[in-house]
Image (cartoon, grey):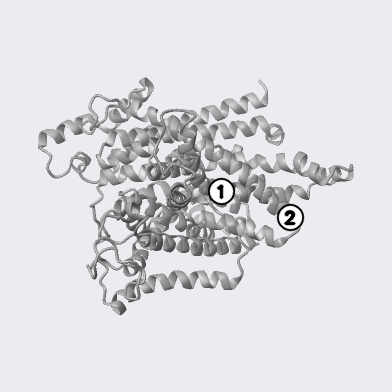
Amino acid sequence: MGSVGRRILRLLGEMAVVALLVVVLTSLLIRLAPGDPARTILGQKATPEQIDALRQQLGLDAPMPSQVGSMLWGVLRGDLGSSLVDRGRSVISIVMDAVPITLTLIALTVVISALVGIALGLWGALTRYRAVDEGVSALAIGMLALPPFVLSLVLLLVVAVRWGVAPAGGWGDGWPQNLAYIWLPAVALSGLLMPQVLRTVRQSAGEIRGHEFVESARARGLSASSVTLRHVLPNASLPVITVLGLNAAALIGGAVVVEVVFGIPGLGQVLDQAVSARDYPVIQGVALITALIVVLINGLTDLAYVVIDPRVRVAA
Amino acid sequence: MSAQAQAPRMAQAAPAGPYRRRLRLRAPDWIVATSASTLLLIVVLGFVLPVITGYGVDEFVARPLLPPSSAHPFGTDTFGRDVMVRTFAASHVDYLVAILGVGTAALLGTAVGVFVASTRIRGLDWLTMRLTDGVIAFPFTVLALAFVVVIGSNATVLGLPPGMPALLAAYVIVGWAYYARIARSQTLSLRTRDFVTAGRQLGYSDTRIAIRHISPIVLATTMAYAVGDAIITVALTASLSFLGAGIAPPTPEWGQMMYEGRGLIETAWWLTAFPSLALVVSGLCLAIIGDRLIRRLEDRP
């Protein structure tokens, strides 16, 4: 087997270990609480019978190892228990209905952030004017200081309510009508990712410009725009994959908040409703599934690196 | 995910900070000084304003929803409380969460990172790094919401405002992993340096070298990152309160004030505008100070 194949197997093995740890951590989450979590969840008015029933349902009456074991077994069977509020509805179906919506929002955010971030980052790196470069950097740092929910509120108020170019939150009947509802939230969530793409591209483009292959391309008589597009851009864009992997968890966390502000029925709304109803199994399910998605995204970005970048391939 | 996979990345992307959100800024000295004074001013005003104006933080002082005026420069909220007094007082809660949460996480993470990089116990280093992979995979917002439900948004410890213990628990339980990674990688590189070799020649034990010689340097790094991370902590605290699950009312907190004003954003803009402004200004100041601290460390030989 080639070194790339061995490398990929190794990555897959590590992903499996991390995924296993995620399941164990999720099942232990409730044990971290001081006192009786079942009582906390049900509140003061609960009868002892109700509390006992919940303890049983959450696996709190079983010893810790068997609780972890039953969670693992449940995950393997695709069974994460059922909602406390919406009796009979399985957690997995509640969560899985929302996952595609959240992933669509994140995908759109990645596209917007990559396009805008790469363009601005290249502009900052290649411009002759220092003021442009510093302006671009200042824009990025300013956006990082703006939490997604604040940006969401501003966009909702200005773009949707004042200008009326987007619906003020809500959700459509299907695709492609939903695009009208999802683009503004994606712009809001881009406030989290775009500045980092910008920063990374700005930095790597600045470094790549000094490399010999760029010099030689220029010496061969290629035009400045052709050097930028064919030589600087592909190399400067590669680290964007890393930025995406590193921010997968933050993006899902941001999406949760943005979805609540815009009323999009993704994981954010599921979580929001579960928190107000104190529906712990659903919250636990969302935590588990989102963490597993992050593990998957991280693994995929590592794999992408091995496959795309010849330097990593050779190093392996 | 693996150290091996990360090594080639690091050559291209700058080492990512904890929470992975950091920018470089060449801010001149006076901007850094202004940022620090601004933060201090916000905190001081939080103490002083209730005395000067005579409006208590939780006191109903005027008719509800008065627009900004000379008597109430930031207007009044739905209960007739003074928004200016509450906005500045909220800085205490938000900054306290940031200091306690990030500080504890950074200390714990540094200890773990230095330990696993120094120990000779086989497999512990690898397992701990996989554990950090697992912990870091949980989106913080989701995890914090789970804690708030299990621990209870009314739980108080040591006189901290209701809701704060659950938030702090979440920050520490997730946050240590980021610092542990930084501390581990820095320890590994420090262990090859001459002063460590010299210490070994002098017959110092591994433990002594780790505690007396390596830890102080590593701690300076993790603490510099911690200042930058305080921004994210403040933003997350506000986000969670905005979801109605962070700091419980009536304790003033920016996100929770915005949550209360969310439905009235078109008629009573001042309910959301001033707390968000305070949040963004704090974030900018912390970003500038944190950037300077890290820059100083990187310039060090």
For residue A105, side relative to residue A223 (left or right): left
Kindly indicate whether the residue at mark 2 contacts the one at mark 1 (C-beta within 8 angstroms): no
- Three-letter code for the amino acid on which mark 2 is drawn: Thr
Q: Could you tell me residue B157's position as x and y percent?
A: 25, 57
Residue drawn at (22%, 27%), measured in percent from left and top? A87
Task: Say above or below: B199 vs B173.
Answer: below
B112 horizontally vs B189: left or right? left
Nearest the viewer among A130 and A297 is A130
Q: Label 1 belongs to which residue? A: B185
Name above or below for residue A224 compared with residue B198: above
Read off the residue under disc 2.
A127
Label 2 marks which chain's residue?
Answer: A
Residue at position x 62%, y 59% in the image:
B298
Q: Above or below — where is B1 with respect to B84?
A: above
Please give the count of numbered marks on the rendered protein.
Answer: 2
**Tag 2: Cα neighbours inside 10 Å, few (<14), some, or many (≥20)?**
few
Chain letter belonging to callout 1: B
